[in-house]
Image (spheres, coloured by chain):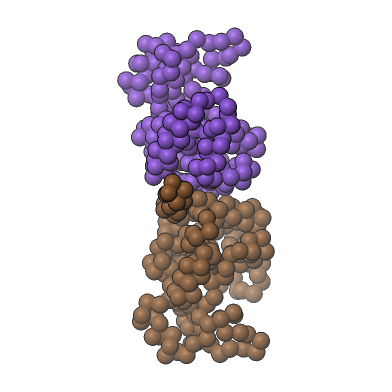
Chain colours: A purple, B brown
């Protein structure tokens, strides 16, 4: 239905599970999805555009937005803030577009607290063995760091309870098809669309 | 996941909306869905097989099952009972197969009372005008009956609140694709599959 609000979808899961790959492939197929644009306090780099790559804010502005609960989630890395501004998400949803957010588990749990009406999808590794291989094959990390990341991944998997759906990332194209079916069926949920259907009937019966 | 239980899907909606057409097309595509086999007290006709076309029961047996709440829904037509036996549905689900039930609104509401864990899909007409055309074009009914059927349809549409999903039957192939996405995404719901995933991890960590 045309006047339906968009839905915020959050794709998350342990590091190494392949969130970025699934998100990238999904966006090649689902051209009507909108990225959630992040907000940051780091400096704008050459070639970047405000409101496209990031929303750039001063530290003071960012902290002010944190205080006003205007971020669905945020974190600090290397002395800079990064976060998801509530206003952009809400405006995009109100305009009838779905918003897609790919994010680490800790961030997703913050979004869950601040925006529980989002649809939370947990990307699950085919096995812990496979997850380990993926982390090792990045090749950039020491064996100690790999062990730490695996421990972290196990903890993150225990956070699954906060999510609405679980999708195994055995093959990217399968995972993407499943995420697509979630997006489609969420739009068919009766509680989301009942009002519009009833209105449609009332208009016809006038 | 292999040891997952099946899900009971109920497709319903006002008469004339095209439930049968959608169900037929769906079964040509989704070969792993099982029909819900009805139970009846009418006599077996030549060429019919017990447990395939219907489960045939005596009036006494049927009424005994009603009393024991062993029917998810039932109704009487022309002095015979017709209903959906709970046992067949539960055994099929336990064997890991999805069961699909296409049924009138009154029957669906009975199933909802007796088996609330089913997934209820309401098939919606593109418009009341279109629904009227479809009923008229059957050509078998007097104009008085058409008016009564339309009144009935409006009442049935008001029952939408009992359903989980609403699918517009504007084009059969669109409606079928939507039902397919509901079937797939219901299997991805975290609360259905969390236990198996946790078990999988525990087994790996032994």
| Above or below: residue A142 compared with residue A42 | below
Of all residues shown, which one is farthest toward the left?
A67
Identify which residue is drawn at 57% across, 14% down: A49
Q: Provide residue A162's location: percent of width, then percent of height.
A: 39, 42
Q: Provide residue A74's location: percent of width, then percent of height.
A: 40, 24
Say which of B181 and B200 sits in front. B200
Q: Provide residue B48's location: percent of width, then percent of height.
A: 63, 85
| Above or below: residue B123 compared with residue A87 | below
Q: Which quadrant would residue A47 be assigned to in this image?
A: top right
Q: Provide residue B80's location: percent of width, then percent of height.
A: 49, 86
Identify which residue is drawn at 55% across, 29% down: A35
Identify which residue is drawn at 53% across, 51% down: B185
Say which of B3 and A42 sits in front. B3
Task: From the viewer's perspective, tell me whether residue A106 is left or right of residue B24.
Answer: left
Q: Which quadrant would residue A28 be assigned to in this image?
A: top right
Identify which residue is drawn at 39% across, 81% down: B66
Say which of B162 and A172 sits in front. A172
| Above or below: residue A206 compared with residue A107 | below
Q: Is residue B83 visible?
A: yes
């Amino acid at each position: 239905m045309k006047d339906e609000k968009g839905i915020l979808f959050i794709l998350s899961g342990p590091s190494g599970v392949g969130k970025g790959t699934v998100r990238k492939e999904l966006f090649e197929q689902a051209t009507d999805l909108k990225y959630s644009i992040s907000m940051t306090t780091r400096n704008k780099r050459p070639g970047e555009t405000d409101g496209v790559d990031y929303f750039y804010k001063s530290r003071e502005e960012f902290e002010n937005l944190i205080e006003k609960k205007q971020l669905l989630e945020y974190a600090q890395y290397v002395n800079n803030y990064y976060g998801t501004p509530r206003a952009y998400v809400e405006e995009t949803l109100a305009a009838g577009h779905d918003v897609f957010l790919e994010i680490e588990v800790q961030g997703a749990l913050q979004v869950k607290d601040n925006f529980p009406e989002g649809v939370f999808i947990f990307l699950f590794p085919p096995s812990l063995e496979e997850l380990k291989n993926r982390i090792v094959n990045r090749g950039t990390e020491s064996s100690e760091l790999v062990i730490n990341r695996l421990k972290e991944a196990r903890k993150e998997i225990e956070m699954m309870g906060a999510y609405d759906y679980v999708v195994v990332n055995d093959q990217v194209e399968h995972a993407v098809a499943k995420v697509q079916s979630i997006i489609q069926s969420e739009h068919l949920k009766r509680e989301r669309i009942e009002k519009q259907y009833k209105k449609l009937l009332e208009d016809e019966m006038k």
